[in-house]
Image (cartoon, grey):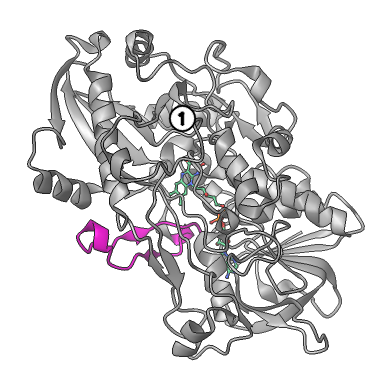
Amino acid sequence: RVLEDLEQLDSAKQSYDFVIVGGPSGIGGSTVASRLSENPRFNVLLIEAGPTNEGVIDIAVPGFFRNISSTYSWGHVTTPQIGLNNRSFPYNQARVLGGCSSHNGMVYTRGSSDDFDLWGKVSEDRSWSWKTLFPYFLRNEKLVPPPGGRDASGQYDPQYHGTRGLTLVSLPWGGPTDFDRLAIKNAEQNKEIKFNLDVNSGKPSGLVWVQSTIGNGERCSAAVGVLGGQVKERPNLTILLNTQVTRVLPSKESRQLDIRTVEIISFSSGNKTTVTANKELIVSAGAFGTPHLLLNSGIGDKKELEDVKVKSIHHLPDVGKGLSDHLAFQVSWSANGVVRPVDTVAAFEEWQTNRTGPLTETGVHQLMFSRITPDAPLFKEHRDPAAGPNSPHIEIVVLSVGPRILASVGLLTPKSRGTVKIASNNPLDKPLIDLGYLTHPFDLLALKEGARIAKRWFEGSAYEGYITGFLGPDPDTLPEKEFDNALKAGAGTWWHPVGTASISPKGAKHGVVDPELKVKGVKGLRVVNASAIPYVPTAHTQAAVYVLAERASDLIRASW
Ligand SMILES: Cc1cc2nc3c(=O)[nH]c(=O)nc-3n(C[C@H](O)[C@H](O)[C@H](O)COP(=O)(O)OP(=O)(O)OC[C@H]3O[C@@H](n4cnc5c(N)ncnc54)[C@H](O)[C@@H]3O)c2cc1C
């Protein structure tokens, strides 16, 4: 059942075993809701601040993802970023059914095996590892043919893919284009970046074909995939939209801190009420929404909460700390190639008629992942932050647009950390989001190395006669300060925040959740979303959140 407003919820008559916050929305919550409600004995309520995704054409059409209205977003703005010459900028986070999976770039990359083994090391619980999580990737995924049915053999390795899951994944509709072929040829001769058959094998480095959460020509978000089909119709699953959870509240009866109640407010009427879960409350409000909610509820650093006049109910200093994200900047080249722009009217007609054509993809066909060479000077000063040898430091996303080649160079292994804080005791006020970009000197040096990797790639012989010049910014010819300033002025996020309610060993004072994702020192409350991930994986983050949530669902089911 989907309820459009709080007024439709009859909490006096209904009781719920599990209440999930930001559930129907985000990947974390949607997945847990879907899995828990497979058991007809469990009654599940999911509460989402945003509206439905249904009928929103810009969400459904992959090629329109850049047009999605800000109505479906929280409207966050970062604090001035010291490392980026004090720039603040809007930070898109979805407020809609499906969460960020309803407005993201749909790239499906898992990261390296070492990234997931690191979760096990950090939590001192080896049941978190690539090996134990791999079956969950398969359980979540259903690899389907590219829209239109093009033969994509030789562009992925079927042994690494699921065929029966709820999240549809496919290779692009188009290609190989001349530009794609040049890249393949270049990889044959390149020593640094070689062709890698499948980005999702646990070893992502190399030139790879992009895989996306697109199925049958449409975006497959968490709302369409894990919550799609018959799932939404289950009688034991209620999805409450347009309702914000403002606080989680402790039980008055219990002597131990027991938190299973949410205070909620309707966006349309402003009416407030509370709902209590019989078994567990699961917070899946994303990397910003989760610490925002916990802090507003008095769970966080006691002194910092007192400073903003929030009554502390549980001193947990790491709530909102440890924020980690991927920062990227653009370098470009002039080229002889001419790429004709998509005729959007004709393409939309084709999409409506057949769910094929250029609007079934984002225009990116291939990605490059690379490690920074061990002899690079930055490693003389800084320890390598990569989780292991399978984790690339740099990702390069290349687009050929007319006579230009644009490469977005992203740092996958940042050392900088940021925070999410609250500025007042009003839960409806926006959080203070400080990404801390480039506050650790390693990150700027590493991004510079990333620009050099991109330069070396396009100097490859396959591009002779095609590339006519490097347009920079060039770390090798510009004075250091000038290059650094150009990078700081142009850099932006890839929207992969994690780590603000991080996992840590059972009994450890640091961290926010234990290896079972239970909030430390609290009964009844778990966190299942990107905020629990301790280090940002060397990938776009949605697959990591899906796998975390798939495993969390089993942990929760096993407890009851
Ligand atoms: C613009 C953009 C592009 C991206 N591109 C990619 C990509 O191409 N590939 C990739 O792998 N990843 C991408 N990502 C990242 C990926 O989508 C996220 O890592 C993932 O969605 C995080 O899932 P989550 O469940 O933690 O949180 P979210 O998806 O953010 O979901 C949290 C949900 O909780 C709801 N919520 C928050 N607070 C409350 C509250 N108090 N009460 C009720 N509801 C609440 C929100 O409305 C939201 O729907 C992108 C992200 C963005 C923003």
Q: Position of residue 20 (x, y in %)?
A: 70, 64
Q: Residue furthest front?
A: 380
51 relative to 71 in the view: left or right? right
Secondary structure beneath disc 1? loop
**Residue 382, position as x, y percentages in the image:** 34, 46
Tell me, yes or no, if residue 223 can be seen here: no
Left or right: 547 as drawn, with respect to 554 = left
Residue 306 position (above or below residue 185): below
Which three-letter amino acid code belongs to the residue tagged 1?
A: Glu
Say whether residue 388 is left or right of residue 274.
left
The image quadrant where one finds the N terminus is bottom right
Name the residue: 56% across, 63% down.
Answer: 50
Query: Which of the 4 image quarters holds residue 300?
Result: bottom right
Residue 333 in the image: state x and y as whole percent: 18, 26
Judged by its main secondary structure, the magenta piece is loop
Residue displayed at 77% across by 71% down:
524
Q: Position of residue 116 (x, y in %)?
A: 60, 41
Please say whether residue 405 is visible from this viewpoint. yes
Distance from mark 1 CB to nearest ligand 1 atom below 8 Å = no
Tell me if residue 557 comes above or below residue 240 in the rendering: above
Query: Considering depth in this image, is 214 or 80 the residue closer to the camera?
Result: 80
Q: In this picture, is 560 found above or below 491?
A: below
In the picture, residue 215 is in which quadrant? top right
Instruction: Relative to 438, say whether 308 is above or below.
Output: below
- Closer to the camera, 371 or 68? 371
Around disc 1, counting alpha carbons within 10 Å, would you say few (fewer than 14), some (14 to 19), or many (20 or more)? many
Q: Residue at x 72, y 74 (%)?
A: 522
The quarter of the rendered structure image containing the C terminus is bottom right
* Residue 253 part of the magenta-drawn span: no
Residue 81 forms part of the magenta stretch: yes
* Boundaries of the magenta span: 71-95
Q: Mark 1 highlights which residue?
A: 361
